[in-house]
Amino acid sequence: MNCKKRLFFLLFMLILVCLGGCLGGGSPTKYSVSGLVLDSDGAGIPGVMVAFVFRGGNSLFGPTTADGAWRRDGLTGSVTITPSKEGWVFEPESKVVSGSRDAIIFRGTKVQHPLSIQVQGKGAVTLDPAPQPDGRYPHDAQVQLTAVPETGWVFSHWEGDLQGSANPAVLTIDSPQEILAVFSQTGPILSGTIAVKHNFPYSVLEGRSVPKAMPEPEEYGHASGRPGEMIIIFDPSVTLPEQLKELQRAGYLIKDSLAVLNAHLVEPGDLDTNRMLGTGELQGARYAGPNQPMFPSAMEIPNDLRYQEQWHYPLIRLPQAWAAATGSRSIRIAVIDSGVDMNHSDLEAQLDRTYAYNFVDNDRDLSDPRKHGTHVAGIIGATTNNYLGGAGVMWDVDLLPIKVFPETGPSSSWDIATAVLYASGLLDEEGKPFNPWPADIINLSLGGEYCPLVEDAITKAYSQGVIIVASTGNENGPIKYPAAHGEVIAVGAVGLGDSLPKRAEYSNFGPEIDLVAPGGADDHGVLSTVPGSTYGLQIGTSMAAPHVSGVIGLMLSAGIPREEVRDILERSSMDLGTTGFDPYHGHGLINAYWAIHAVDRIKVMVGTRVEDTVEAVTETWVEPKGGLFQVPLPPSGEYRLIAWVDVTNNNIIDPGDYYAESEPFAVSPDMEFDHWHLEVEEVE
């Protein structure tokens, strides 16, 4: 081949190769990259968003894992990798790759923000933890500020980026912060007592009587605020005379109108409204529906058909609690009992069918001829707000049924201990069932005599962070085990009572009791699910315990740390006997609303009120059950003595808060400084 032919051949082959690449004859090479995002100590930073930007501008994103790792497969060409997270800076800012790479490391450092503290009056502010030498804190650091007045002065309030009169106060440093601590000169000390008055059998917000018998089903056949009333809304293009003419033609009685909304409150005639709208017989109407029930914003009332019979829920303030938390499928509660009707229409969606277990027959048959376990499970977590049957304390929950009772007769300590280990994910032995998803809470509506085996199982489960709740027993005698164990929350029972909930005569008592909850008595049983997709009434401390288990589930779903649960339950409960602990009621009747908001104090202030806000000049606090107080007076001026349970801690007097105030008084030398008394009551 001569030189010209050889040159022509080489050029031809080169053109073919180029055309093959341009026309897609070959695929771009795909590659993978991975690495870590670490802090200055070498620990992984989770939740860093890693961006992968292609040369053409397209992007992919993905977060780092709990240990700071990241990985992206299927990349092509040149890609720029950039990490980002609010409050962090990274070195290097980005990396460019064009082929597979492992162990690409980004180092992250938190942004530092300055905190400036100024003082008005005489006093100082301590910071915990202390800032860096340059007065800065890392992004999202939480700092406790404590105002320390000099002699003759009192802390008044914070201004600037921190508002209110709480002392100490916690501040999250997410930007440069400027704080002013205001101190005032003090006068004499005002002293006295604060008492708490709870409304029973339900919150003043509900304002309704408790039905003694189940209403007939037809009473729930509508969802109207006032039965028989409907709301009709017309399109704005229809004039008011045309609207009125159309309603009159259709035979409606107009009870009220809102012309600005083209809306009318009517009593329906003989024609079916939905049919009229569908066929155009009610010309120009764009909506027709019932006059829906509405409730105060501090409450959430479920629409379950037999909820009105569940007197036991308003008694422990669940409607207010439900406005803030109704549970979560991430909260797992084991019901160690007589089984559960797995096909109950009000339970089946809440039950773990995979790991439910029967330790009586060592199989998966959870049938419940005794009806006890189904009833207990329904109190904790019957499906709620579904126009069916009754409500559960938790509207959403993951229930793990564990059967330990045969059709008749008792269970055994062995089966109870085994079930506790299984529920806690600790039964990991050959030949035995294993539950890979440990329960957050175990409900034990059962009891007997002391057994060290059960105690050991309880202790082991407790050491793993499992919260254990048990009934005290129904013999009107000493508290049964396992409720009597120190790690267990022991629950006694109350009935509805007349003016105050009354300890059920059967409920066991003693120094080991922690709380009481509704268990029913006399003609007021606790309504819950029973096998066969039906509902029934039962009484006993077995019914009281699941109320507490359910409320604990609400607390966990609201973000309360499990190690704080018992203390919060005890201090937020409602006194029924003597003030404070007593062996018949423990620390008191569980208060779901206060518990999920972790109420820890009654604020006692000398200050002023304007509508629903309070301005404190001086402040102290007492326990949520009330007690003695001493609060310094300002040197002069006109003020009120104010006591306030700010349940949601929003610094606004809301319905459901507890509040009391004195008449205005002027500070003067001839004042009486002791024996002041206020009784806080629920705000309507």
Image: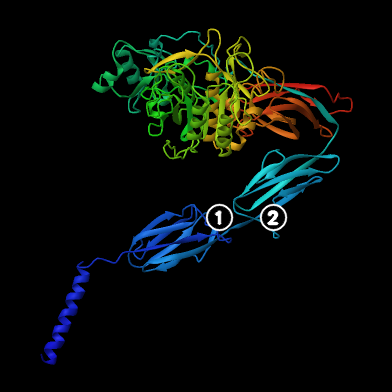
Q: Is residue 666 visible?
A: no
As helix, strand or loop, the secondary structure at mark 1 comes to loop
Rendered residue at 73%/27% (across/down): 642
Q: Decide: is 596 above or below 252.
A: below
Which mark, residue 131? Answer: 2
Rendered residue at 69%/45% (across/down): 144
- Name the amino acid type tagged 2: Pro
Depth order, front residue of 407/124: 407
> For mark 1, what is the residue?
87
Depth order, front residue of 62/359: 359
Depth order, front residue of 37/481: 481
| Residue 55 placement: quadrant | bottom left
Which mark, residue 580? Answer: none
Q: Residues within 10 Å of mark 2 (few under 14, many from 20)?
A: some
Q: Quadrant of the N terminus?
A: bottom left
Residue 354 percent coordinates (x, y): 38, 34
Marks 1 and 2, the one that precedes in the sequence: 1
Q: Quadrant of the C terminus?
A: top right
| Residue 545 placement: quadrant | top right
Mark 1 in CB contact with mark 2 (< 8 angstroms): no
- For this view, does 210 lie left or right of residue 484? left
Q: Decide: is 145 above or below 301.
A: below
Q: Residue furthest bottom?
A: 2
